[in-house]
Image (tube, coloured by chain):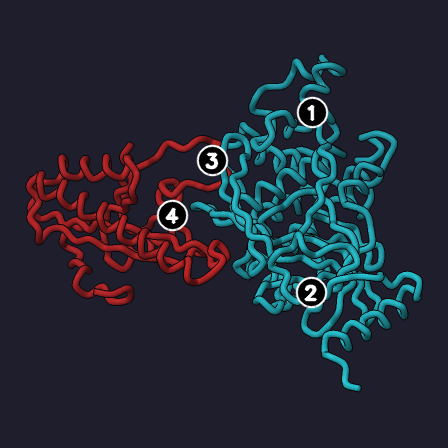
């Protein structure tokens, strides 16, 4: 007897799940989804079929940010590609537009699946980005199917090095600086190709333990730029530089409570232009920081008179800082 | 006249051709009023009122169907402002023959400052006039400043920044 197509497909999918996870794990009931327009309807154990490939859906991915509890991203689902058994991340279409504030500046940001899909194609052979491909589902939604990256966040790696800042800076920072430079070069690659990352944050870099590289993730945001086409990206790179040079954020309230003598030396111009509770002029805190590095940091401070417009300008200055770090520590990386 | 043909706008080098780069802002209006006040009696001064519309990235619109009306609305709005600015110049005594308006839609991958300087070069204007918004330090850091860009990168012309 000929079975209806859907039954056949469901039977095949049940076999695939059993083959992957064992017969006991095959769910009694699950939906087979080809139209992901309403991503809230995609539930645990459902199977999303994209480009003829079934993906067995597991949990939502989460986003932790600055102490706020992890928020589930319902449009980002971890899934098993049933034809290979590989873990994938499915990013479903979620159009979102919002305004974000950096300092006192309001920036209109929007989430664009098209942009992320385009960049996935662009960076397919670039080791410093997440990889994946995209498929239009039955309703024409651009679903991105991402390879799962095994490894910790870059910022967690950085703060884990050294017993204190002095130890970190002299023993580990040269290699962290090299990694940072590699990450800036990756952003330069985007800019040179007319693209922006759009959401440069320290928790958007993962250390891939398999390839031993840092990889930028989550580039579906875009923003309405002004005269400086890459200003928001540059500001993100600046925040990251301050973070890696300081082995974390140096917060004004902490200095006020714990190191009043240093707090008393600070001026408003020493603070980060983006986050006024963070110190950018780190040489006031850590006097052994080379001038060349500190000069680069000061481009991201309230007191800055000129700003980096391009990654090339930043890279030029950091080449000098890197040479000074080698002289200071005797370490190449 | 079209985007690539400037034949009817390009003035001879001997003429005093001002390029006033304007948008919908109050500082643009101030710049035009300054021009009206300062140059209306100079019969050999020709003014091109230029407005650049930076086209948002295709990513900004979920569909092409939403993109087109946005651009049309923006174009209509700017055309209205250009007409208003022209009326200010006419009211101050400029003759119609001494004023041209030009609206250019440019890809968002080119900065407005660069687009203005490109037009200045093609039109061979001897002065570029812009208003200045007086943006904050932080704002300049994230967005950049069109007037600063023009001040720093203009070649073979004078730059007038009206506050």
Q: Which residue is mark 3?
A: B139
Name the residue beneath numbered marker 1. A251
Callout 2 environment at 10 Å: few (<14), some (14 to 19), or many (20+)? some
Q: Colour of chain B?
A: red
- What is the spatial separation of the Cα atoms under label 4 and label 1, in whole angstroms? 38 Å
Structural crowding at the residue carrying mark 1, measured as other residues with C-alpha within 10 Å and reported as few (<14), some (14–19) or many (≥20):
some
Q: Is residue A101 left or right of residue B109?
A: right
The residue that mark 4 highlights is B153
Do the numbered discs 3 and 1 sit on residues whose CB atoms are within 8 Å?
A: no
Measure how far apart labels 2 and 1 are at the Cα level: 48 Å
- Quarter holding the N terminus of chain B is bottom left
Mark 4–mark 3 distance (CA, rounded to whole Å): 20 Å
Chain letter for the cyan part: A
The answer for how far apart the CA atoms under marks 4 and 2 are is 55 Å
Of labels 3 and 2, the one closer to you: 2
**Quadrant assignment, res A100:** top right
First along the sequence among labels 4 and 3: 3
Q: Residue shown at 50%/40% (left/top)? A: A107
Foreground mark, 4 or 2, reads 2
Please tell me which residue lies in front, B87 or A14.
A14
Q: What residue do we see at 16% from left, 58% from top?
A: B11
Mark 4 closeness class: few <14, some 14–19, many ≥20 residues within 10 Å: few
Q: How many marks?
A: 4
Closest to the observer: B45 or B29?
B29
Looking at the rendered structure, whether the residues under marks 2 and 1 are on a common chain is answered as yes
Q: Are marks 4 and 1 on the same chain?
A: no
Asked whether disc 3 touches disc 2, contact meaning CB atoms under 8 Å apart, the reply is no
Q: Nearer the viewer, residue A86 or B139?
A: A86
Q: Report which residue position mark 2 lands on.
A: A33
Helix, strand or loop under label 4: helix
Residue B161 visible here? no
């Amino acid at each position: 007897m000929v079975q209806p197509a859907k039954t056949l497909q469901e039977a095949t999918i049940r076999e695939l799940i059993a083959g992957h996870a064992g017969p006991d794990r095959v769910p009694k009931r699950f939906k087979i989804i080809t139209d992901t327009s309403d991503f809230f309807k995609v539930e645990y154990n459902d199977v999303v079929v994209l480009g003829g490939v079934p993906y067995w859906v597991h949990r939502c991915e989460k986003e932790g940010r600055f102490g706020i509890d992890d928020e589930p991203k319902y449009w980002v689902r971890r899934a098993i590609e049933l034809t290979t058994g590989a873990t994938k991340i499915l990013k479903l279409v979620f159009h979102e537009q919002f305004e974000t504030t950096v300092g006192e500046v309001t920036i209109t940001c929007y989430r664009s699946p098209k942009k992320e899909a385009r960049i996935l194609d662009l960076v397919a052979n670039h080791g410093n980005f997440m990889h994946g491909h995209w498929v239009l589902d039955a309703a024409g939604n651009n679903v991105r199917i991402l390879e799962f990256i095994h490894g910790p966040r870059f910022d967690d790696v950085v703060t884990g090095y050294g017993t204190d800042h002095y130890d970190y800076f002299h023993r580990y920072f040269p290699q962290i600086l090299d990694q940072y430079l590699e990450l800036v070069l990756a952003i330069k690659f985007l800019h040179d190709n007319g693209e922006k990352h759009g959401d440069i944050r320290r928790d958007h870099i993962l250390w891939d333990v398999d390839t031993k590289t840092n990889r930028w993730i989550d580039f579906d945001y875009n923003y309405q730029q002004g005269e400086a086409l890459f200003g928001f990206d540059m500001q993100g790179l600046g925040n990251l530089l301050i973070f890696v040079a300081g082995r974390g954020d140096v917060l004004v309230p902490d200095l006020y409570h714990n190191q009043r003598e240093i707090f008393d030396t600070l001026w408003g111009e020493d603070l980060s232009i983006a986050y006024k509770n963070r110190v950018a002029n780190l040489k006031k805190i850590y006097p052994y920081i080379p001038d060349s590095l500190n000069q680069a940091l000061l481009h991201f401070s309230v007191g800055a008179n000129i700003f980096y417009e391009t990654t090339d300008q930043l890279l030029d200055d950091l080449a000098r800082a890197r040479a000074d770090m080698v002289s200071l520590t005797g370490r190449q990386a | 006249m079209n985007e690539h043909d400037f034949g009817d706008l390009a003035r001879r080098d001997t003429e005093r051709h001002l390029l006033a780069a304007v948008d919908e802002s109050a500082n643009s209006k101030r710049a035009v009023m300054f021009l009206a006040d300062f140059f209306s009696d100079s019969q050999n001064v020709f003014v091109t009122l230029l407005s650049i519309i930076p086209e948002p990235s295709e990513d900004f619109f979920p569909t092409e169907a939403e993109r087109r009306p946005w651009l049309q609305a923006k174009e209509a709005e700017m055309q209205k402002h250009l007409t208003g600015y022209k009326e200010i110049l006419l009211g101050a005594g400029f003759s119609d023959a001494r004023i041209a308006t030009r609206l250019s839609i440019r890809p968002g991958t080119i900065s407005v400052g660069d687009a203005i300087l490109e037009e200045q070069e093609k039109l061979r204007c001897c002065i570029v006039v812009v208003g200045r918004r007086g943006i904050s330090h932080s704002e300049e850091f994230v967005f950049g400043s069109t007037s600063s860009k023009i001040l720093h990168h203009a070649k073979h012309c004078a730059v007038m920044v009206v506050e």
